[in-house]
Amino acid sequence: MKVQQWKKQEVETLKKLILEYPVIGVVDSTNLPSMQLQKMRFKLKPDVLIRMTKSRLLKLALEQIKDKKPGIEKLENYIKYNIPILLFSKKDSFRLSKFLIKNKSAAPAKPGQKAPNDILIPAGPTEFTPGPVIGELGQAGLKTGVEGGKIVIKEDKLITREGDIINDKVAAVLAKLGIQPMRIGFNLLTTYDNGLVYEKKLLNIDEEQTIKDITLAAVQAFNLAFKIEYPTKENIKLLLKKAELESIAVESKLNLKEVKTEGKVEPTKEEKVEEVKEQPVVPKEVKEELVKEAEKPVEAKPEIKEPENNIERDSQVALDVLKRLQDEKLKKPMHIKPFVEKPAKKVKIDDVFKK
């Protein structure tokens, strides 16, 4: 069977693009008007290359280059349409998904379309006056009432869940209430990014909720580290302050029963009160006996005279007399005779020998 030349060229072009770009996305083109497609092509042109092709040719190209680009054959599982739309980009998958979501526009729901997400009709007043509209709202499952001449929806109502088919009644009610649940634009099904395949659920990230989750995780991690006293750059100052406060608390508890004054430890008022409370209880019988003993008259005891010690008395008198005599003797002037040198006697030698 002869293959048309344009098909061969298309396969070769697809192979070249798949090998050149690190990120390849598969887009759901359901309910995408041609005008919207042209607008998206113009917006994405600098950073993203859009190409529409036949699914059979795309699968053939993927089969031929699976050895050169590992994991690329996984994209076949997401090619569900006869003419899929491919996105070729050098941006990472998450930036690409964010850009596509940002450039979607709101549109009213049509019967037979799938709900892109859960559609909730909130409670509150409407602009409608009482009339046939009440019946239409009731058929859609809404509880209504009349307040101030206007129809009021009394309770929130989840009218359609994500993926459910929107019927005629729901589509009519949404249109009357001015709710546009549909988003017209590129619905990114999956991307191939440097060997990894990311599905739609991973790519559609709510930035606000993600930031809240990261903030909560950081707070919980900080609290855990502080609770188990694991030092980090962020909590070291608080841990030191906590240690200081705990040491002061321990010191204050230890000093409740002791007060240091001038190096001595004296009992505090609280301790004295405790000592009084801890005194033993005297039985009533013992108290009565003590009172009786205290009331008895005290007998006068005879005065006991110490025995006289004559020896000590005589010795003291003698010492007094001796001292008085010494004092009187010292008062008398002392007569000292002058020294007169006498001449030596002459002795004769004959007398000496005579003796």
Image: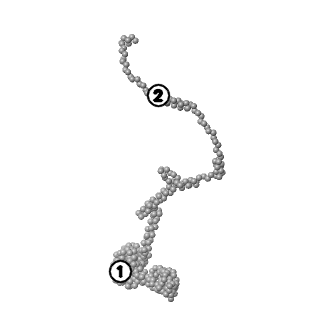
Q: Where is residue 333 in the image (x, y as percent from the top left)?
A: 43, 27
Residue 43: assigned label: 1
Q: Position of residue 172 (x, y in %)?
A: 47, 86
Question: Hey, what amino acid is under mark 2?
Answer: Lys
Q: Mark 2 points at which residue?
A: 329
The residue at the point 43 percent across, 70 percent down is 215
In the displayed structure, 180 sits above or below 222; it is: below
Q: Is mark 1 on a helix, strand or loop?
A: helix
Q: Is residue 166 left or right of residue 294?
A: left
**Quarter of the rendering containing residue 180:** bottom left
Front residue of this view, candidates 304 and 242: 304
Front residue of this view, candidates 198 and 66: 198
Question: Callout 2 environment at 10 Å: few (<14), some (14 to 19), or many (20+)?
Answer: few
Front residue of this view, candidates 121 and 354: 354
Residue 241: assigned label: none
- The answer for how far apart the CA atoms under marks 1 and 2 are is 145 Å
Question: Hey, what amino acid is under mark 1?
Answer: Lys
Do callouts 1 and 2 mark residues in contact (Cβ within 8 Å)?
no
